Amino acid sequence: MKKLNVVLVRSGVEAYREIVSVALYSMISSVVLAFLVMMVPLPFVLALFPLLYMPLVYGVYYAFHRKMSGKRSRVRDIFSGAVKGFVPAVVFGFLMSLLAVIVWSTWWYYGGKDGMIYLALAVFQTYFVAMALASQFYTFQLVLQEEMGIFKAMGESVKLFFRYPGYTIGAFLQMVCVAFLLLLTVVGFFLLFNGLMAIYQHKAAHNVLRTDEPAEDEVVEGQVRA
């Protein structure tokens, strides 16, 4: 199993090599998100987000999964992937919407009250939601790489989270940091995020699913000895 920094470097190299596809695929999937954010009232966004946006995100992951597997990948793979993975994407999208509602309602209820105990409760529930989201870091990749059903993939992702807690939390925090930095430019998020995460999560999940593969430094050492 490779270290997380090795996965990050390899993901960066791959993203740079495929920057045109990263930008194009991300832009296509983000058109729907931009429409939802700018044109649709918030309560409807939470309902339409899983139905319209998440299937396209899954489509981007599907297209890059094909590319990472050595197969030919085209723009139309985004849409074919969205159709094939519609149910997993919708289920996962509704989970994300539910977690977002929990965080919003927590701060709406406790944030308006005085006292440290209410603040502590709000922080604790936010932390709980963050860990629940981190535990689903591998879900899409388990559906793609292992061909699992969505609910089995969710359960297996939780198992991997507890099996490799440090690695998973570190990988999740890297994803959050990239999202935050791209959100500072807004345009960068829409143009890059989905493509970057498709590559990064593919490699991060592959690393824990194929732990029998030697780390890069072990390979180099073996080549030197040979």
Image (cartoon, rainbow, N blue to C red):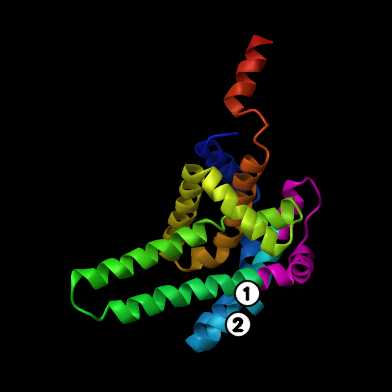
* 77 within the magenta span: yes
Question: Which of the two discs, 1 and 2, labels the residue nearer the N terminus?
Answer: 2
Q: Write the start and end of the magenta stretch as one range.
A: 62-90
In the foreground, 82 or 119:
119
* 223 within the magenta span: no
Expressed as whole percent of the image width and height from the top left, the position of residue 76 reads 78, 66
Seen in the picture, residue 148 relative to 78 is either above or below; the reply is above
Residue annotated with mark 2: 48
Residue annotated with mark 1: 53
Mark 2 is surrounded, within 10 Å at the Cα level, by few (under 14), some (14 to 19) or many (20 or more) other residues, namely many
Inter-mark Cα distance, 1 to 2 = 7 Å
Position of residue 123 in the picture relative to residue 206 (left or right): left
Residues at circles 1 and 2 in contact by the CB criterion of under 8 Å: yes
Outermost residue on the top side: it is 225
Position of residue 193 in the picture relative to residue 130 (left or right): right
- Which kind of residue does numbered mark 2 sit on? Leu
Quarter that holds the N terminus? top right
Numbered disc 2: secondary structure = helix
Seen in the picture, residue 6 relative to 113 is either above or below; the reply is above
Outermost residue on the left side: it is 115
Seen in the picture, residue 216 relative to 149 is either above or below; the reply is above
Rendering quarter of residue 52: bottom right
Quarter that holds the C terminus? top right
> Could you tell me if residue 139 is visible in this image?
no
Seen in the picture, residue 42 relative to 70 is either above or below; the reply is below
